[in-house]
Image (cartoon, rainbow, N blue to C red):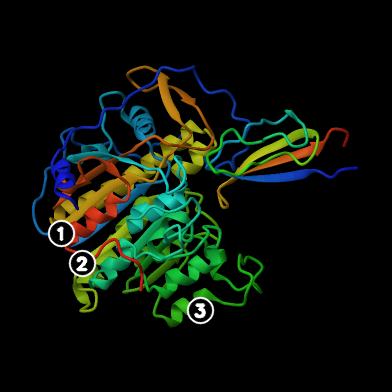
Amino acid sequence: MTARCVIRIDATESPAVRVGDSVRKGQNLCAGTKLGVSYVSPIDGVVQEVRFDPAQHEFVISVSPEKE
Amino acid sequence: MTKSRRALTVTTAAVTIVVLLSSILSAASGVDYPNPKTDANDISFYRPPARDRSYPATPSRVRNVILLIGDGMGLSQVMLARMKAMGAEGKLNMQLLPVHGLIRTHSADKLVTDSAAAGTALACGVKTKNGMIGMAPDETPYCSILEAAQDKGMATGLVATSTISHATPASFGSHVKSRKMEPQIAEQLIGNRINVLFAGGRKYFLPQSNADSGRKDDRDLIVEAEEAGYTVIETTNQLRWVHGPRVLGLFQLDGLTTFAPEPMLAEMTKKAITLLDETATDSRKYGQGFFLMVEGSQIDWACHANDAANCVRQTLLFDEAVRAAVDFALADGRTLVVVTADHETGGLTIPDGDLKGDEIKVHWSTKGHSAAPVPVYAIGPRSDLFGGVYDNTEIPQRIATALGIKAFPQARK
């Protein structure tokens, strides 16, 4: 079984997903292209958490496998 | 500075806030934000200005400079705070300053900047890539206006509500390839002998043997700071009583909570001004005045969470620090105060509301940063340099002009 994945996005950018969204492997998790870096989901799954981490100035997106 | 640029600065036109009609109240953000320990809606600490006319201009030679930066503070953040504190007719302290301007904020390679590239522009007068601190895109370190002031014989200080090694304060006293190198930034801040450092971020000063450490080596920067002549403090009570030419105040392991028992930003600002003014008066080495940068770090954090109440609170906390700086400048007569921001966060607009400010509707277009221009407010000798519409790199260039520093910007030797 695939483990839960955590993706960190520089907070200059905005997340494109919300808690409860279903995402596909390779789907862009980032709303724009401000950073020139693509942040994609490494698995098919459901977004469990979208949290701002002020210390790192990053959004933390947690994705669980569809059948955890 | 070119003649044409200087001509622009003479203007002291008021900034017009354009409120875009957009969708009504922002939807639930879907972002978990660390909850403050007390009520973010409580803004009872804020004292509206007793006057509604602009502060007077004070022409004379510049001895001291206080630069205040609201992280993430665009025009709408200022307007929202003003509306909630005083209604449509009110003005924040920063809006009472006689000179107004606007700056553009793009970084060297992106339309939308981060705080590292914007901090570097505001500190060093050069554009760099997002994430880089105190250096050009080719990794050449550039002298910051704080370091140039030090070279001129001025006492210097940094105050923030983030960690002291966070991007904005870091840009004034360190030079690293990535903003994430906070342990190295902490080393450089102490190594640069900046007289006053007040913020959070104690974990980056503790050796890895300490359970609270954020370092991966055995260096104890607290001990190193004491050996370099710093008095190290951790509490508000210590802040009230401390004196000396070098003071390191680290009031949290990480960023500040901005709630008691920590010192408020205005209290740290007042104390930093007192210490720096004493040092500049008493010390031959620092006899040329002082330079102080104060950051309201958490306006940005509130806006990343699309949290309007905390955005208001953080902006008003910042405005109280502006009041402290302006009170000193008006009494001193030789102090230039410049208030600005590094970028706007949240794409905030105010599509509707009532004149009293009780029912303000807000709309956030992003959880990240935006490319919106940000305001500049100034008072004091040579504040005329800060009017107009210009680039963020010109802020430290104009401060250098006001201080008679000719070689700026310049690569660091």
Residue at horizontal 32%, vertical 18%? B355
Residue at horizontal 12%, vertical 55%? B333
For marks 2 and 3, the one nearer the N-term is 3
Same chain assignment for discs 2 and 1: yes
Same chain assignment for discs 2 and 3: yes
* Residue B70 horizontal side relative to residue B388, left or right: right
Labels 2 & 1 near each other (Cβ < 8 A): yes
For marks 2 and 1, the one nearer the N-term is 1
- The residue pinned by badge 2 equals B289
Q: Give percent across and percent down for residue B3.
A: 14, 48
Q: Is there any visible trace of residue B26 in the rendered image?
A: yes
- Residue farthest to the right, as pictured: A1
Q: Residues within 10 Å of mark 3 (few under 14, many from 20)?
A: some
> Quarter holding the C terminus of chain B?
bottom left
Q: How many marks?
A: 3
Give the CA separation, mark 2 to mark 3: 28 Å
Give the CA separation, mark 2 to mark 1: 9 Å
Mark 2: which amino acid?
Answer: Gly
Q: Nearer the viewer, residue B363 or B322?
A: B363
Name the disc covering residue B62, or none: 1
Q: Residues within 10 Å of mark 2 (few under 14, many from 20)?
A: many
